[in-house]
Amino acid sequence: SSDKTIKLWKIGERRLKKTFKAHTKSVLSLAFYTDEKILASGSQDTSIILWDMQEGKPTKTLMGHTKAVWALQETRKGTLISGSEDCLIKIWDIKNCTCIQTIHGHKDTIYNILSFNDDKNIITCSDDETLRVWEVDDGICVQVVKGHEKGVRCLAINSEETLVASGGYDQCLRIWNLKTMKQLKVRDKNDGVIRGVKFFDDYSVLYTDKHVKLFKLNIA
């Protein structure tokens, strides 16, 4: 939240379990390692903090970005991928608290990162109006995807890893074939900036503008 905290809720009981405090500015992104019970948070204060979920206390701080950290993505390899207003993607070894790779390419704030193909690839979106597909090991951008007319704020990949949904400041929801990155559908004339998107199932998309909307794709 902009109040600099993270809150953990017990959903079934609608009860607040813990409040995490350590950041000095707004908290913008989260990632969660289920097995290790580690939470990672990115902030406008440029830091990434790792938290012990049981204790609700910070255990490590990762420093390296020079501007706000808007995007975090955990991987099954035990690494953390971050994206920032400084236009950089960084890959971190969370055990050793070291940045093991810095990836350049975007020309403006990176808002979202998602991994796919067993964490071998990531897709990112940015205020530079593009989506980009990367090979993680080499840090190579294999595709720059254009279509949005303003910054791209959010991404989602369906469970089959066949489709990508993106939304942003042009108020359009766009659906892409993940393999070819060909645009399949556009839903425009929405009521505001699209800040969040999620596949409800493989062919339905839940997204937010000024409202919460469910869109059936009708893709064979």
Image (cartoon, rainbow, N blue to C red):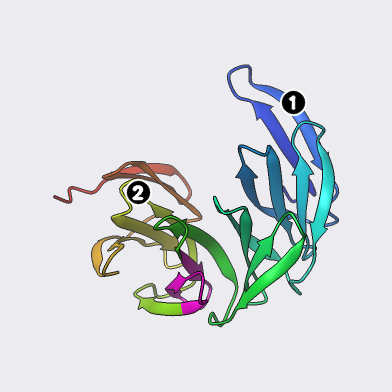
Q: Position of residue 85 (x, y in %)?
A: 66, 72
Q: Secondary structure at mark 2?
A: loop
- Is residue 15 at least partly visible in the picture? yes
Residue 123 within the segment the image draws in magenta: yes
Residue 75: where, in percent of width, then height?
55, 53
Report which residue position mark 2 lands on. 158
Q: Point out residue 94 in the picture as x, y percentages from the top left corner.
A: 71, 56
Magenta-drawn stretch contains 190: no
In this rendering, the answer to whether 80 lies above or below 145 is: above
Q: Secondary structure at mark 1?
A: strand
The magenta stretch is 122-140
When the figure is inspected, residue 44 is found, relative to residue 198, above or below; the finding is: below
Q: Residue at x 57, y 54 (%)?
A: 77
Mark 1 burial class by Cα count in 10 Å: few <14, some 14-19, many 20+: few
Q: Residue at x 80, y 49 (%)?
A: 4
Q: Work out whether mark 1 precedes mark 2 in sequence or the reverse, and give the earlier one.
A: 1
Q: Is residue 106 left or right of residue 207?
A: right
- Assign the magenta stretch its main secondary structure: strand
Distance between mark 1 and mark 2 Cα atoms: 30 Å
Q: Are marks 1 and 2 in contact (CB under 8 Å)?
A: no
Q: Nearer the viewer, residue 190 or 149?
A: 149
Please give left or right for residue 28 compared with residue 47 in the image. Answer: left
Query: Tag on residue 203?
Result: none
Residue type at numbered disc 2: Asn
Camera sees residue 191? no
**Which residue: 76% across, 74% down?**
66
Type of amino acid under label 1: Lys
Q: Seen in the image, is 211 located left or right of residue 173?
A: right
Return the residue found at the far left. Answer: 220
Q: Which residue is mark 1?
A: 17
